[in-house]
Structure formats: structure tokens, C-alpha cells
Image (spheres, grey):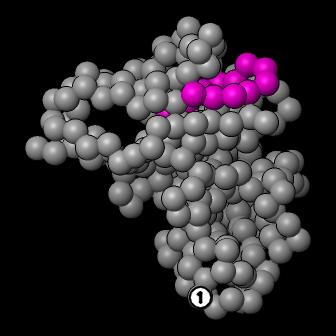
Amino acid sequence: EPEVTQTPSHQVTQMGQEVILRCVPISNHLYFYWYRQILGQKVEFLVSFYNNEISEKSEIFDDQFSVERPDGSNFTLKIRSTKLEDSAMYFCASSEGLVDENIQYFGAGTRLSVL
Amino acid sequence: GDSVTQMEGPVTLSEEAFLTINCTYTATGYPSLFWYVQYPGEGLQLLLKATKADDKGSNKGFEATYRKETTSFHLEKGSVQVSDSAVYFCALSLTSGTYKYIFGTGTRLKVLA
């Protein structure tokens, strides 16, 4: 069964450093998403991406964040200068984009620890 | 704004016990509703869904009914197994204007043999 793959599973970084989280969505999907979950809190939407551009972003997704689909398979989330409060589990998801269904398929997540 | 509220966990049950995990939502329009499950070390997997009022989603013995009048989508299972131990997430997706999901906090279920 096709699946969304995320790497690395755990990333440790120093405050102020740049990190890139990587995702390989399901190959025929058109919509891509990033969510995050700070420990003990809700899973929060960060950004959605369609047709090589951001289609929606939350207020969390400020200038420190960017997303890219550098080739036909990868979808990346970059945090330019990490802060302690960026420590969280980051989930990538993809969907076919059907309005009636909108089933999103999620990766296992990347745990980001900012020290 | 749109939101999902789930019961706090963890929930600990004995094998073969009845499970209910409460989920209520606030949304403009007519959302689709989902339950996702996360087993240790894995991603969120779709467990079941319902796209309109009174729909019942079901899978692997789990059920949830979309109740518009009470804005609820409670997850139930008649007889849990140790293998059901996981974190369960309730989520909604609005059907116009955005494709993003809005999640609850997740409820950890632990089933004891």
C-alpha cells in the first residue's frame, strides 16, 4: 500500500540553526500538508501546498518557515532559524484533493528537538 | 472558530471492555469527520470517516455516527483488544474553502490483557 515517508524520524538541533524536514508524498497525490504537534497539545495545521504554491497557511507559519517541492517526489519544510518552541512532532500528509472525501494520508512524523 | 474537542486520556481498559471516546466539534458549514489512529512509531492512519449528518463510519469493529444535532462524532467499540492500544485522533475537514484538517488533542488508549 502506498505510504507517505518522512525523514529523519528524529532531528536534534541547536537553537538558531536551520533544519529541513523531508517528506515523500504518495505519488499520484496533488495536495501536500504539514502539521505539527507540540507535546501534549493538539495537532495543528501549518501549511497546504498545491500546484507548486502555498494554498493556505496558518498564523504559525511565519517567515521562518518555508516549503518546497524541489523535484517530482520530495516535499520539504524548512525552518530557517529554529527556536526552542519549534520543538514538536511534524507530520507530513498528502491527499488526492477530492472535495467530497479529502482523505489525507500521513507520515510517521519527524520529532524535532531544539536545544 | 472551527474546533474539535476530545476527551482527555489516557483511557485504560481491560480486554473485551466497551470503549467510548468522545468527540465534539464546532464548525461553520458541513464538515467531514474523521477518526485517525496512531500506533507506536507509525503515522496517523485513517480509521473511519463520515461525510454527512447521520452517516455511520465503521472499520475494524470501531463505529462513529455523525450527529449534527449534538455536533458529535463519538468513537465506540464493543470489545477492545490489546492490539487496539494506540492514540486516537478526531478531526474535521471543511468542505469548502480549505482542505486543512482540524484535530482534537488525541486520546491515548491502553488495553490490558
Residue beneath the point at 66% across and 80% down: A84
Residue A77 as seen in the image, left or right of residue B19: right
How far across and how far down the image is residue B84, in percent?
A: 28, 40
How far across and how far down the image is residue A37, in percent?
A: 59, 59
Magenta residues, dominant SS class:
strand
The residue stretch that appears in magenta: B24-37
User: Viewer-proximal residue, B64 or A91?
Assistant: B64
How far across and how far down the image is residue A7, in percent?
A: 55, 71
Quick check: A21 above or below A60? below
Quick check: B81 above or below A88? above
Which quadrant is home to the C terminus of chain A?
Answer: bottom right
Residue type at the position of mark 1? Leu
Residue B29 painted magenta: yes
Residue bearing mark 1: A115
Which quadrant is home to the N terminus of chain A?
Answer: top left
Q: Is residue B42 visible?
A: yes
User: How many tags in the picture?
Assistant: 1
Q: Quadrant of residue B33?
A: top right
Residue A99 as seen in the image, left or right of residue B87: right
Q: Secondary structure at mark 1?
A: loop
Residue beneath the point at 75% across and 76% down: A79
